[in-house]
Image (cartoon, coloured by chain):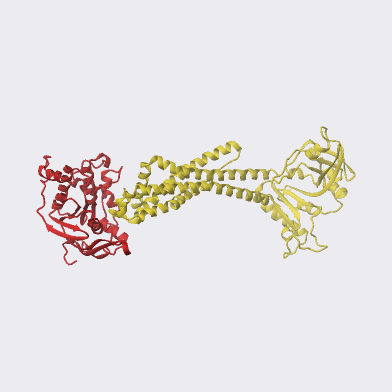
Amino acid sequence: MRLRRFIDIAVDSILKNKMRSMLTMLGIIIGVGAVMMMVAVGQGAKSQIRQSINGLGTNLIVVTPGASREGGVSRGAGTFNRLTVQDAEAIKRESLLLSGVSPVILAPTQAVGGKGNWRTMVRGVSTDYATIRDWNVSEGRLFDAEDLRGMRKVAVIGATVAKDLFPNQDPVGQNLRLRDVPFKIIGVLQSKGQTGMGNDQDDVILAPYTTVQTRLAGHQFIGQIVGSTPNPQDIPAAEQEVRGIMRERHKLAPYEADDFTVRDQTDIMQAAEGTTDVMTLLLAAIASISLLVGGIGIMNIMLVSVTERTREIGVRMAIGARGSDVLSQFLIESIVLSVIGGAFGVAVGFGGAEVIARLTGWSTAIAPAMVGLAMGFSATVGIFFGYYPARKAAQLNPIEALRYE
Amino acid sequence: MSEPDLVIDAKELTKVYGTGGSEVHALRGVDLDVRRGEMMAIMGASGSGKSTLMNILGCLDQPTDGVYVLNGARVDGLDRDQLADIRNREIGFVFQGFNLLARTTALDNVELPLLYDRSGRKLDSKALARDALERVGLGDRMDHQPSELSGGQQQRVAIARALVTNPTLILADEPTGNLDTHTSVEVLALFQELNAQGVTVLLVTHEPDIAAYAPRIMELRDGLVVRDHATVARQHAVLDPGGGEPVEPVESLKATS
């Protein structure tokens, strides 16, 4: 009941000084609005990055040799500590969840042909690779099972390689020498552009892994095995499955750690999202400064208000208001002021986020929790910056307050 | 305590402001008894200590020394919150400058003290405020704001505000200081009328002509009581409904101002 009265008094006092209240609230409105907008931008950036990581390939699982956790520890000669083509074939054979599996044999090679030579990365892969990476040819064709089985010397080149070795001509059908081995170009890959890390994905030559292994790599160990599932929900289960197959093949006892690493894109995604989270926090922190300034504005006005209403405070005290009554009155006034400001700020935040969304094409969704958080935060600002003026009012001496002109 | 009929029983009240070399003795030992239902004036020039005495009697301030029993309970030595509660319950203030809340209706102004009531009583504060306004003859002005009321009407709202808690005593500090003579008489007549209904009234003033409306006058000088005597109070013709001009008191007031 008393609280209701105090809120009435506070609202009354705010309404009696409309202009001043508006200006005071403006600080909070801008502060809360800025914080909301910055967080929305952060959210937008995050979902944007998530999209582009998904674009690297759909539902990718990557198996690499060696458990990175145990880097530096020698596992000893003779143990099965490397990935082999047979591992990839076993996974392909035994996995129920993976829709495609391909070994990746990396062979950095000087490619000679057309206009000159070009240092690039030859990837020996299977026919599944294009599906796994969601990659297709813009010209020609991909190699098929026949090429693979026959260890044919055919290659599909990336857009960058095509541009550098065969400018202004069709590379399909041309020859290419890789380590003095002639390969026939059967297709050109679609351009994928750069990765998030700045690597040119088009600077690549794909060839059947069988051919690469015998002709170029000269050893039977492979760099990685990639696989993909039809839908993202299966990724964790597929990882477990691959791990099981690999442990069995490498004859690892239960107490032995994995001698390989299975990773999916959630790791990459988490890393990237962690970065945007930090950016969001940074932006929000900068925007918070304006909220702080808004809070100081409230304190300023509340101090003016206390001075202006010294006599009123004296009267209230004379007729029986305790210090705590006066304190609550002014504190509630400052909280009401900042919460109303916060509500307008939320509206401004929504509007601003919408504008940013239109300008950048990002989805700048504001989570409902943000609204609650913003309101709670502005109430906190009201309490924090209203307390000092309210306490000043509560500690006034009624005699002096009554005499104040 | 000894005499239940005493509203104020103060003994040897002293008040010293400042410390060391710059001490000011505002009160040097004041005794005061006020019976229930009494109307008295405390008179003195500025610097006589009457404001200090009023602040102590009104529980706005504490005496440096002495005993103050208000309505049977000692109030010297209480803390700020206790004093606030006593002011709320026991005392109704009427100030020279009315001190009404601006842009607030008469009714809300009068209701204000009840909002700070902590006794936990069930109060219909609106009804009590309405009653108090009717008692001072402003039943038809309840929704008016102070700026829409004349000085006399504003002071009557203030008196209603003092009355609304049914206090032990009404403490009026120069209640006519901001009013013209005619209105002054009306306000003083209202005090007399309330007193006749049993309300204890303490008038604090520096004007002998105002003090003359009280049947008992206490004079202060330099922090001491120099005179405390009964007078034949100037009786204003009880406000006649016909609105006839009370001639005699007006004349005498004009003579002094």
Q: Nearer the viewer, residue A181 or A247?
A: A181
Residue B127's x, y, as percent? 24, 48
Viewer-closest of A363 and B225: B225
Of B13 and A379, the residue lying toward us:
B13
Q: Is residue B5 visible?
A: yes
Which percent across, then down, holds residue A393? 36, 53
Looking at the image, residue B200 sits to the left or right of residue A297; the answer is left
Residue at image coords 18%, 60%: B225
User: Which corner quadrant of the image does residue A183 belong to?
Assistant: top right
Extreme bottom residue here? Answer: B2
How far from the left and from the top, in percent, is residue A322?
32, 56
Q: Is residue B38 visible?
A: no
Along the viewing direction, whichever of A105 and A339 lies nearer the viewer: A339
Q: How many marks?
A: 0
Residue at the far right in the pictured view:
A180
Q: Residue furthest front?
A: B21
Instruction: Report the chain shown in red.
Output: B
Above or below A286: residue B40: below
View extreme (top): residue: A168
- Across and down, in percent, residue B95 comes to 24, 50
Look at the image and give the colour of chain A: yellow
B25 versus B110 height, above or below: below
